[in-house]
Image (cartoon, rainbow, N blue to C red):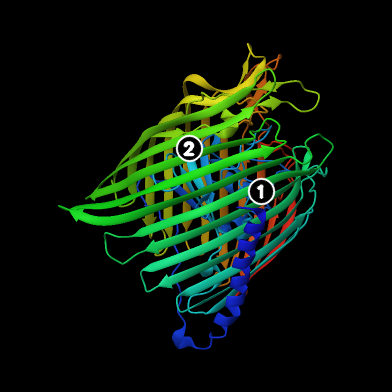
Amino acid sequence: MTSRSRWLLASSALGTAFLLIPALASAQSDTDQTQSLKPLVVRATQAQPGDNSTSISHKTVQEHGSRKLDDVLRSTAGVYTRQSSQQAGVAVNIRGFEGSGRVNMSIDGVRQSFGFTDHEAAGFTYVDPNLLSGIDISRGQVTGLGGGALAGTVNFHTLGVDDIVKDGQTFGALSRVSLGSNSAGLQSMIGVGAQKDGVGVVAAIDRNVSGDYKDGDYNSVAHSGQNLTSGLAKTEVHIGTDQTFGFGAVIYNNNFYADSYYQTIHNNTMSANYAYTPGGDLVDFVSHVYYNELNMKYTGGTGSYVGRKIYDQGIGGDAQNTSHFNVHGVQITSANGFEIFHDNAGSRNGGVNPGTGQQAQVGVFTNNTLNYGIFSVSPSLRYQYFSENGNGYLSTGYGNYVINQSHGKVEPKLTLAVQATPWLQPYVTWSESMRAPTVQETMLGGEHPGTVSASFIPNPYLKPETDTGWEFGTNSSAHGIFTADDAFTARGDFYLMNVSNYITGAYVASQKAYQFQNIAGTSKVDGVELSAKYDAGFAFATFDYTHSHSDLPATFSGLGASQYLPDNVVATTVAGRLLQRKLTVGANYQFTSGGWTTGYNSTLTAATTVPNSGDPYNIVGLFASYQVTDNINVHGEVANLLNADYTPFLSTTGNGPGRTFYVGTEVRF
């Protein structure tokens, strides 16, 4: 799809939304004909005892008072991010695995497969936090929709019709405006929508310009600002009560400085969805087709790569049907479907990044849960297949090379659970998963820029990484503990991953060059995750804890970046609701210990692990919000209240922001 075609499609969608809204809104006074649309569920998921998942609302993102998503993700058990003061994208790390398909990241279920090779995370997702309605995270193997990764999935949900138009209304609008100190600047979003006679439309646009912030020692952190413009347009069409079509476009444009160059990012996400829910037990069908194109361009700087362009084009689709039935007293839920994804990646003046390469992935799955009395068994199966091809010319010495490989694997998953008491459910999960090598890994090649002399060569024979994992945990839920309406939920687990054929950079002495290689043997990763929440209505508290240990081989800096998590992370939030619960006042706290990082040996021919690296730090924040009316909310946050001077763990560049004040409003009518 050409750039002209993309913008014609996006502008047509936006134009159609804005043209339809006045026409639909004109009928708002006719209350007898007003029809509230049920939310379109485009990515159905099936709850199982072993589904280790977390959903984060936009309000929770807001309470962490940050311009980026890193703070709220780092406060979630088992989840972390590779962070940079300069880079605008988000790179999610789950259980010590990040990028390159080890964690699948999506926007509205559209896979984000962009990656590049640098002293940085292997891949980023570019999404505007102000356009989000929520974030869904799954840890461990995912056999259903979004699967095919090694360690988990993350799906960023953007605003839909039901987020802007209230039930029973024909027209609606949503405005989010915030102003921050410490060069956070002004961020403003406006969204409008309408719904009538089974048709809903919505459009939104956001603008965010920030400057270089100061750290806790009042030093300016260079190039930590950005210039972001983003928007979306969506349409939902309901046919009767059982069929829904949805169409959407999310546009992201950002300018920032990272990796020694000024960069421009254009990310265009387009999707179409269909759901058929006739109301019976046997049919609950959803399907999804999509296209995503991301272009990164180096627009300025002093190096030789000004004008570099790295692109990624992904097209895919999926379908799933969920059925419920009873066999001799056994309650069975079965979700069956498939996924297809094709990725085309390449570059111009890309350095060590491939000139062009393609990868295709296919997944066919069945997820099942059988409940009988207090017992639950969840047998699931996924067949994952990939093929990869490409070619290039490396140099006079190395000549041409060709990549052409494919591989398939059956990935089983089994969970056993017992509802031991009304409030306690222990479970155990065993699973296998596979991660295909990326085109950036198989087609690495070229020379190191600047004064450092180093050569890089491809590896057409890379094998996929595989994992055999165990998880032992408990789910807890109780109500009416101290008051009639209070509630407590908790989940704790110990996980163990045994990873074979792990891929990392290595020095090839015979070639005097670097390449990605499979590491022989099995590497072990284990950890403890705990997440708990107590809500008494007038007050609430959350607690998240992660302990991590890994003996994965060190990542060769320059062929990615360290992925080791801190040894320990603690995050907690405590808040009270006052004035008839219109006012919420609270505080959040995060402790991050040191941990392993990576380095080099003296000859730069091997990566090494550096234990006990990084200084522990404590971050405290305050937040408050007041519901002025049903339509108006005002809020304020203080991030890094104690003005700690710290370097975030897994930081590529720069210290973290010093004390920063935010004030904002959210208006919905």
Q: Which residue was labeled with disc 1?
A: 620
Residue drawn at the location 71% of the way across and 14% of the way down: 602
Mark 2 belongs to which amino acid?
Ala
Query: Circle 2 is placed at which residue position?
Result: 151
In the image, farthest residue toward the right: 302
- Left/right placement of residue 629 relative to residue 224 reads left
Residue in the picture at 61% in, 22% down:
515
- Which residue shows up at 68% across the image and 17% down it? 397
Is residue 48 positioned above or below 29 on the image? above
Q: Nearer the viewer, residue 134 or 664?
A: 134
**Disc 1 element:** strand
Q: Is residue 218 left or right of residue 366?
A: right
Which residue is at 64% across, 55% downward? 128
Q: Residue 454, relative to residue 93: is it above or below?
A: above
Three-letter amino acid code of the residue under disc 1: Val
Q: Earlier in the sequence, mark 1 or mark 2?
A: 2
How much space separates mark 1 and mark 2, taking CA atoms? 29 Å
